[in-house]
Amino acid sequence: MDNEANNLIKEKDLVMLYLDERRQFLVQAISGLRVSTDHGDLNLSQIIGQPFGFIGKTHLGRDFFCLKPSTADLMMKVKRTTTIVYPKDLGYLLLETSVGPGSRVIELGTGSGALTMVLAKLVSPTGTVYSYDRRDDFIENAKRNLIHVGYANNVEFTCADVAREGFSQTGVDAVFIDVPEPWDIVPKAYEALKGGHHLVSWSPNVEQVKRTIDALEAQNFKCIRTKEIIEREILVRLQGVRPRERGITHTAYLTRAQKILVAQQQE
């Protein structure tokens, strides 16, 4: 019974309303709120108290499905003031680190807060995400996005120019870098990281990658690798199965590395 009760849609829960592939709406379940579509209005009062998976109807009689939002859904639906890291890239980068419950993680480049949200979910309930950006307006938008999805409690925001000022934390478990000049941040990340732990960075251009790797090698990082993830959807249909004509191809080059302690630090 407890599991069934936990699966009920409560007031202010986030719900993905799915009509079809083109009509999907991430909404907060609020009594009296209506969502208008070209297939009719969706009255959210009818879904509160129902289980996720419930089939509702618009006022024109069209079925819609109440789904539990995935982490990728929450990422892609945030209010954006910047580009965000795509789920296909972030999944790989997260697996290339040891981030988990209780981790202390630095993120540079708060942006719209999509990565911040995922990191906050992973480190909860006792870990912390230290998110840095040079722009207050980006931080304020990210805060609103995290409050909306319920992941703000494990995040500390700082407005700073890290290339000049560095990070305030040391002994962290990972550093995620999403800025145009990651090579300038490599020495600051080295100071902040635990020995043996992970730096990850993504850049759209090969020239950025080369300068970043040069900086990583000069700063005693090892196990340096750069990859690119290509995503292509497969259409499974009655008339035949084939790849979709368009896919999510190049988004960024993904670089990961691990900190090595130099001899004088080991002594």
Image (spheres, rainbow, N blue to C red):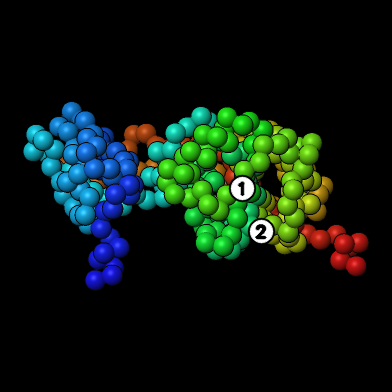
Which is nearer the eye, 83 or 31? Answer: 31
Q: Which mark is residue 227?
A: none
Is the Cβ of the residue at disc 1 closer than 8 Å to that at disc 2? no
Residue at 20% in and 44% down = 45
For discs 1 and 2, the disc positioned in front in the rendered view = 1
Dot 2 corresponds to which residue?
173
Residue at 63% in and 31% down = 135
Q: Position of residue 133 (x, y in %)?
A: 64, 36
> SS of the residue at dot 2?
strand
Residue 172 located left or right of residue 86: right
Task: Examine the rendered structure and indicate whether residue 51 appears above or below residue 162.
Answer: below
Does the rendering let one see residue 89? Answer: no
Mark earlier in primary sequence (1, 2):
1
Query: Alpha-carbon neighbours of circle 2 within 10 Å: few (<14), some, or many (≥20)?
Result: many
Which is nearer the eye, 251 or 171? Answer: 171
Residue at 24% in and 43% down = 31
The quarter in which the C terminus is drawn is bottom right
The quarter in which the N terminus is drawn is bottom left
